[in-house]
Image: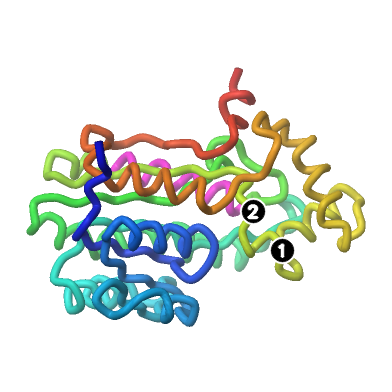
């Protein structure tokens, strides 16, 4: 049994780093042509020739950006078979009370409205084709909220409901919608100055320079059964599964890629 992704066309948002970049690479390895959208697509230009990838700079919080991404896909490859809604931000916070109205708005503009705008723009194309797949990057925080990520947690909970609505309305028209929900995936956003590892170090009273100590404290506190952080590769494999014909009877689910942490916390 194969994933049968050869020759298909996928849009990946947030394609320039982390989960988006790894998923882009795995799609291309499977023979899928990719339209990679990000605020800065410099990391995408050297992946392959123009016959396999089209990179477009796009800020999905801005009017018209989603439509421009979809049009770029049509212009480059003539169709869109898959949308991986992935662009987002996970700003660390001190607690709920530290999050201002402006912070809430910025998180929702990207994490929620960006997904809505992309889905709204691509679905008419998929309807005309008679088939399509929507995969949305959610999070374990959308099921069990994280105290240091209040606005992010709420935004990812919204993604779960958006996908269920899309599944209800469009599966009967040949368009499936599912969520992949990663937990504890170490991407560049963890390690940049002011990133999640710095937030964790402060939270656990570990020196910011002691990255391994911050990770160890987090793993112990999170009760992660796998005993390690996940990787973008772990998530990309799940995205390709949900995008492929292997999962043709799967729509409306939230697929956890979380090292077992969500099931263990629900028992």
Which residue carries the number 1 mark?
191
Residue 99 lies in magenta, yes or no?
no
The location of residue 66, given as percent across then percent down, is 32, 71
Which residue carries the number 2 mark?
186
Label drawn at residue 88 = none
Q: Quadrant of the N terminus?
A: top left
The location of residue 151, given as percent across then percent down, is 60, 53
Above or below: residue 145 compared with residue 54: above
User: Which residue lies most toward the top here?
Assistant: 267
| Secondary structure mainly formed by the magenta segment | helix
Instruction: Please tell me how crowded label 2 is: few (under 14), some (14-19), or many (20+) other residues with Cα within 10 Å.
Output: some
Marks 2 and 1 in Cβ contact (< 8 Å): yes
Magenta part of the protein: which range?
A: 151-165
Residue 139 in sight from this viewpoint: yes
Q: Quadrant of the C terminus?
A: top right
Residue at x 46%, y 66% (from the top left corner): 14
Residue at x 29%, y 48% (from the top left corner): 243
* Sequence order check, earlier mark of 2 and 1: 2
């Amino acid at each position: 049994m194969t994933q049968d992704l050869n020759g298909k066309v996928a849009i990946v948002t947030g394609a320039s780093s982390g989960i988006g970049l790894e998923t882009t690479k795995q799609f291309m390895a499977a023979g899928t042509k990719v339209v990679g959208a990000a605020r800065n697509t410099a990391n995408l230009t050297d992946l392959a020739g123009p016959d396999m990838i089209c990179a477009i700079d796009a800020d999905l919080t801005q009017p018209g950006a989603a439509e421009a991404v979809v049009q770029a896909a049509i212009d480059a490859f003539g169709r869109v078979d898959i949308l991986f809604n992935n662009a987002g931000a996970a700003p660390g916070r001190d607690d709920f009370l530290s999050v201002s109205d402006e912070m809430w708005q910025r998180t929702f503009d990207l994490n929620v409205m960006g997904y809505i705008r992309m889905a709204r723009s691509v679905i008419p194309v998929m309807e005309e084709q008679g088939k399509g797949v929507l995969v949305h990057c959610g999070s374990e925080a959308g099921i069990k909220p994280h105290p240091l990520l209040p606005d992010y947690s709420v935004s990812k909970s919204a993604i779960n409901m958006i996908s269920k609505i899309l599944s209800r309305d469009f599966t009967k028209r040949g368009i499936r919608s599912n969520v992949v929900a990663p937990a504890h995936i170490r991407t560049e956003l963890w390690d940049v100055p002011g990133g999640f590892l710095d937030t964790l170090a402060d939270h656990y009273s570990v020196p910011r320079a002691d990255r391994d100590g911050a990770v160890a404290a987090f793993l112990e506190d999170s009760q992660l059964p796998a005993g390690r952080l996940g990787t973008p590769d772990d998530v990309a494999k799940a995205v390709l599964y949900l995008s492929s014909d292997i999962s043709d009877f799967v729509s409306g689910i939230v697929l956890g890629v979380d090292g077992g942490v969500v099931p263990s916390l629900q028992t």
